[in-house]
Image: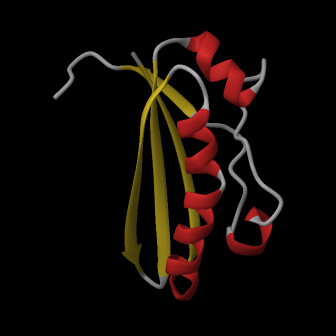
Amino acid sequence: MIARMWHGVVPEARAEEYLEYVNKTGAADLRSTRGNQGVFVFRRIQDGKAEFMLISLWDGYGSIKQFAGEDYEKARYYPEDEKFLLALEPHVAHYDVLVKP
C-alpha cells in the first residue's frame, strides 16, 4: 500500500469553505479512482492559517497514475484552488505504508 500526501494552507477565515470545496473536488475524485483505499483530510489551525493535509491510500503506483497522470509526483489542483490557497505547492510525497491499523 502507498500513501500519497498533499499539503495546502488557506486563511483561517476560509477554512470551513475550503473543507467543503475539497470534499466536493479532490477528496471525491480520489475516492472514486479505482485502486484508492481511502482518503483522510486533516486540518490544523495556527497563527491565522488553516493547514490541510490530505492523505490518500493506494494499492499501487498504477492506480495513483490513474488519478494524477504519468507525472504522479506533481500536485493536482482544481480551478478554484487558487482562490483559496496561499501557495500552490508543486509536488506531493509518496510513502510505502509499512504498518496498518
User: In the orientation shown, which residue stands out farthest toward the left?
Assistant: 101
Q: Residue at x 83, y 60 (%)?
A: 79
Instruction: Using residue 1 as the reference point, say whether residue 94 is left or right of it.
Output: right
Q: Is residue 16 above or below residue 76?
A: below
Quadrant in which the C terminus is drawn: top left
Q: Residue at x 47, y 36 (%)?
A: 56
Figure disc tally: 0
Q: Position of residue 96 (x, y in %)?
A: 39, 17
Q: Is residue 70 above or below residue 37?
A: above
User: In the orientation shown, which residue stands out farthest toward the bottom?
Assistant: 13
Quadrant in which the N terminus is drawn: top left
Q: Position of residue 44 (x, y in %)?
A: 37, 68
Q: Is residue 79 visible?
A: yes
- Residue sitting nearer the eye, 16 or 74: 16
Q: Quadrant of residue 33?
A: top right
Q: Residue at x 40, y 64 (%)?
A: 43
Q: Is residue 61 above or below residue 34?
A: above
Q: Position of residue 19 (x, y in %)?
A: 52, 68
Q: Residue at x 57, y 66 (%)?
A: 9
Indicate how the structure is coloured in the image.
Answer: secondary structure
Q: Is residue 73 visible?
A: no
User: In the orientation shown, which residue stands out farthest toward the right?
Assistant: 79
Instruction: Using residue 85 as the reference point, say whether residue 32 is left or right of it.
Output: left
